[in-house]
Image (cartoon, helix red, strand yellow):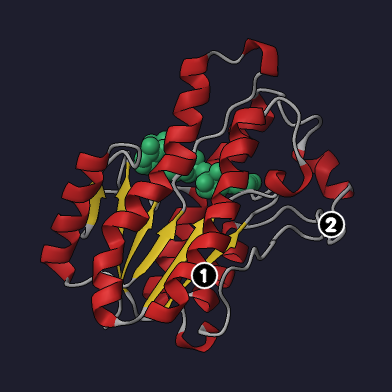
Amino acid sequence: MTNAIVTGGGSGIGSAIVDRLKADGLNVAVLDLNPPDAEHSYKADVSDREQVEAAFAAARADLGPITVLVNAAGVDGFQRFSRISFEKWQRIIDVNLNGVFHCVQTALPDMEAAGWGRIVNISSSSAHSGQPFMTHYVAAKSAVNGLTKALALELGPAGVTVNAVPPGFIDTPMLRKAESRELLGGTIEDHIQRTPVRRVGRPEDIAATCAFLVSEEAGYITGQIIGVNGGRNT
Ligand code: NAP
């Protein structure tokens, strides 16, 4: 049986990915700052290498080698560029970019040993379009897209695919919090009217894309940035 780790699997998009991969027959472990009270859930801050290594070691001991990794843990931030403190800038980069670095490096030995692996990085459609007041977040997510492309070239010969899914406007606690703080430039309903498919995205939309990318069938897809955004970015 294939064993997967989903970071950020305690909420929103990550949680939907966990449910979908389980439904598809994978053994799935959750790594999150606040993991659910469930089997195979491990507490770790993805920006902390020691915590990541400890959580992976515990997951390996419980499940066996991990050959699927979905990096969904992330934090957003809204601040005029001139007012972003370096500490805040660093934290956004630490979680969204360096977290991917730590988790991929920690996961890789099992994939290389198996000669097979799947890595999916959840970036952001804001890396496509840019987004005012989110320079730190957009910089981090753009770097995740770049890392994805470069790593795919390195790992292809080892049987490991690496792809990114940049979501656009998905109805999760992160999006609802931003709406309630009036940080979205309108309500979710306003944005729906500007979205070609005329609805907000669902975590399950991202989960379905991830489920395909980690499947055997997707073995010829690597280094791709697969937008799931209702046509908001093309
Ligand atoms: P969410 O509901 O806030 O879920 C994010 C999860 O990641 C939470 O469980 C959170 O834990 C966890 N997390 C945050 N920092 C962490 C850390 N340092 N270490 C480990 N876990 C951490 O947000 P979401 O909307 O599902 O977002 C999932 C991913 O999609 C993120 O990478 C986000 O940037 C990306 N994304 C979302 C949208 C959207 O429209 N929703 C659009 C573009 C990109 P806590 O709850 O304890 O903080």
Q: Tell me: 162 left or right of 189.
A: left
Q: Quadrant of the N terminus?
A: bottom left
* Mark 2 surroundings within 10 Å by alpha-carbon count, few (fewer than 14), some (14 through 19), many (20 or more): some
From this view, report whether residue 124 is shown above or below residue 173: below
Q: Where is residue 10 shown, x and y percent of the image?
A: 38, 49
Residue placed at 80% from the left, 29% from the top? 185
Q: Amino acid at mark 2?
A: Arg
From this view, report whether residue 115 is shown above or below residue 82: below
Task: Determine which residue is flagged by label 1.
Answer: 153
* Mark 1 surroundings within 10 Å by alpha-carbon count, few (fewer than 14), some (14 through 19), many (20 or more): some
Q: Earlier in the sequence, mark 1 or mark 2?
A: 1
Q: Where is residue 198 shown, x and y percent of the image?
A: 84, 57
From this view, report whether residue 161 is shown above or below residue 203: below
Task: Determine which residue is flagged by label 2.
Answer: 198
Q: Where is residue 208 shown, x and y percent of the image?
A: 57, 71
Residue placed at 63% from the left, 48% from the top? 124
Residue placed at 42% from the left, 41% from the top? 98
Q: Where is residue 6 shown, x and y percent of the image?
A: 37, 58
